[in-house]
Amino acid sequence: MNENPVITVCGCGAGAMATAADLAFKGFKVNLYEVDDLKENLEPIRKNGGITALGNLSSGKTGLAKMNVITSDPQEAIRDSDLIFINVPAINVDLFIKYLAPHFKQGQTVVVTTGYWASLRCQKILQEAGAADKINFAEFTIMPYLCDKDNAHQVHVGNYKRELIMSTYPATKREAAHQVISKAYPQVKLAQDILAVNLQPGNPGVHAQITLPRAAFFLERAKVFRFYGEVSMCASKLTDAHDRERMAIAHALGCETRTWPEYCRAVYEYKGENLYELTATYTDPHQQRWSTVEEAERLLVEDLCYSFIPMEELGKLVGVPTPVTTAMIDLLAVYTGFDYRAHGITLEHLGFKGMTREQILDYVANGTRP
């Protein structure tokens, strides 16, 4: 591996653009990749001469960030890369892995910044491509940036995470992955395994908890709104109740975790004892973000299908009841008309079907099946 790794960033959404620009500002060679189906997203960036990034980036820099390569060819995108960031919504991760898997090389580190059990969900694709043993497959708890696109070639970063938590599947590869990832993001900390990553705050999010007390406003009346500006004490109490269930499951699986308020104080440097207090300051970047009903509904699909439902199933496995989590899934299915359970990630999708608690722990630690 190079002393200064060559990095590929996948996707052209706000998170990918912020990642690519910030890492280029830090002095890394950055290749920007978009799947061929969406290659038109690359053209405005090419014409601009790179990505324009404004706001509060971890590099401390803003302006035009030039890319090393801009391509929709997966082989060209990762040929010389040591580190590959996949910065796309959970529902699109499989597509990117499918395109990239035939071209992965031994020792490359792949990071899905949105987490949501990606390293387990994508094992079948990797195995079919003969790539499962080649790469170090890591997940973050959440994307490194709070950001929005101003236009097709410009991104604005409201805030960046002062702490990122990661692990790999299997956990035996986490040290090797951390060694290269920490060159790009020194604030990255290791979790013991993929279970610990996905049972941290971050992803799972708080979108369901915020939506339910304001459901009529978000889903019926408003076209655009400041989503985090609508946090109520009811949302805060739902967050605390969900935290208790999540943390009980984490404890039953031997994972260290923390509450949402503890997470926000560490990651965003916000102040407050609960979600309501943490988001009560108008000047914080979360408060100032505008959202749409379409974006809110997409985030609900991510949180419920890729976090709440697998957490609920893990709760059943380890004997931890999840009445609040279950109620949120069921109520929002009624409100939105979307069948989250039909699209949700199950223990079978994670490769856990038929396993005991001890077998799951061995599987995520060592990659061994019973």
Image (spheres, helix red, strand yellow):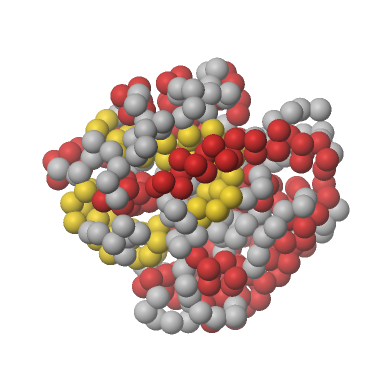
Percent across and percent down for residue 286 are 42, 70
How many marks the image carries: the answer is 0
Please report the residue visible at 49 percent of the width from the left and 27 percent of the height from the top: 107
217 is higher (above) or lower (below) than 319: below
**Res. 63 in view:** yes
Q: Which residue occupies 34% across, 26% down?
A: 80
Q: Is residue 74 left or right of residue 171?
A: left
Which residue sits at x=70%, y=38%?
364
Residue reaching furthest to the front: 3
350, 82: nearer the viewer: 82
Q: Is residue 301 left or right of residue 53?
A: right
Q: Provide residue 46's location: percent of width, then percent of height.
A: 17, 39
* Quarter of the figure with the N terminus: top left
Rendering coords of residue 39 (x, y %): 28, 33
x and y, in percent, of residue 82 in the image? 40, 32
The vertical placement of 253 against 289, above or below, is above
Which quadrant of the structure image shows residue 325?
Answer: bottom right
